[in-house]
Image (cartoon, helix red, strand yellow):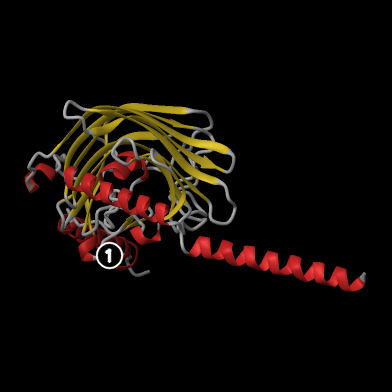
Amino acid sequence: MARHMKNLAQCVLVLVATSMAGFAQDVANPSVDATKGLQAIFAQWEANEARFQSVRCSWDETRLFTPASVIPAGVPGFGGIAEDSRIVQTGWPLSDIILEGPHHLLLSGAMMRNEELMLGLPPDGGEGYQSSRHLSSFDGTTSVTAGIREDSTGNQVKQVGTSNVDARGLMWTPVRYVVRPIDRRFQNRKVDALRVQTIDATSAVLVDAYSVELHVDRSNDGLITRALQRHPKKDELLWDYDLTVSRNDQGICVPKEWTLREWSGEKLSRVQTAVVTEFSFGEPLAASDFQLDLPPNLEVFDQRMGLTRQDSLVRQPTPVKSESRTFDYFWLIVILGVVFTAAVWQKYLRRKPI
């Protein structure tokens, strides 16, 4: 009896080991159908990128900020900002805040121009919030970024650098995943790092090394109509979106509308709903099309010269009136010296001997 039980246990162990080896082999070597399907998706993405090398896209968007909104980097104790910095109020919404307005995007190869709504802290660090326009351009070599308040007052700046600050921005992710799904300048992933989770003739779910899950509509030009990312350790949802597509007059699939959600734990922190008002492609675009029309006398931070800006806390702006300031300080010191000398002379030198 004992010998039979021993033989049975050995058989079970052999079966488990065999099945585990088979499972490991399946993970390391996906099926031929999955591999062919993945290659077909990559080929469709390459075709989409070639088709959408130049794009004009505009949409009307509504941004909802909830009390769970992510704290911005300018708040003391966050983002490397010292606790004793002069911004002492978060100014972040205690109730829901809604911003509505247009969003404009221009692309041609690596060149990009982006104009969108922003919500942030007041420049003086007070309570409340301010809305502004975020404008940026990248001509393939130089980037220009500006924050412009609608009333054209307050602390407005322009930053100049060498990298495209909005290339991987979350707020245009649904469009980015359509027009630049594999371009490394716009995606933080390698194509060969993508793995098939599920796949059939009309759809597929791919996962990359950063826990981003891509839902591909194979029946509509292989566009990514849903995507989400989870926290790698907590398995919490960080963001997700759902995209609706339509076919234009040429039968090409293009974005129509979407909803993008950001999460803070189990709570919604920010929601963007967008309805596309223009999506055209194939138009030759020049570098001049990516120049921003900015108001004069902005405070300039040239990152190429080592000048930086961190939410109005560390400021090394290009001096605009440095000479006049030096002149004022000089005469202030002279005047104080004259006043001091006169006081000493009046008190001591003019005293008559007793």
Report the front residue among 135 and 279: 279
**Residue at point 16% right, 29% down?**
250
Using a 10 Å C-alpha cutoff, classify the residue at mark 1 as few (fewer than 14 neighbours), some (14 to 19) or many (20 or more): few
Q: Residue at x 24, y 50 (%)?
A: 46
Q: How many marks?
A: 1
Residue on which the image places disc 1: 341
In this rendering, the answer to whether 95 lies above or below 185 is: above
| The one of 203 and 117 positioned closer to us in this rendering | 203
Q: Indicate the quadrant containing the N terminus: top left, top right, bottom left or bottom right.
A: bottom right
From where the camera sits, is residue 120 visible?
A: no
Residue found 80% across the figure and 68% down from its top: 9
Residue 61 against residue 82 in the figure, above or below: above
Q: Is residue 39 left or right of residue 144?
A: right
Quadrant placement of the C terminus: bottom left
Q: Amino acid at mark 1?
A: Thr
The image position of residue 86, as x and y in percent, is 45, 51
User: The residue tagged with tag 1: helix, strand or loop?
Assistant: helix
Percent coordinates x, y for residue 275 in the rendering? 31, 26
Q: Is residue 327 left or right of residue 260?
A: left
Image coords of residue 91 (percent x, y): 47, 38
Q: Nearer the viewer, residue 134 or 263?
A: 263
Q: Is residue 296 visible?
A: yes
Instruction: Give the vertical position of 170 relative to 117 (above or below).
Output: below
Q: Quadrant of residue 128?
A: top left
Residue 141 located left or right of residue 211: left
Q: Position of residue 191 (x, y in %)?
A: 34, 58
Residue pushed farthest right?
Answer: 1
Question: Quadrant of residue 15 in the image?
Answer: bottom right
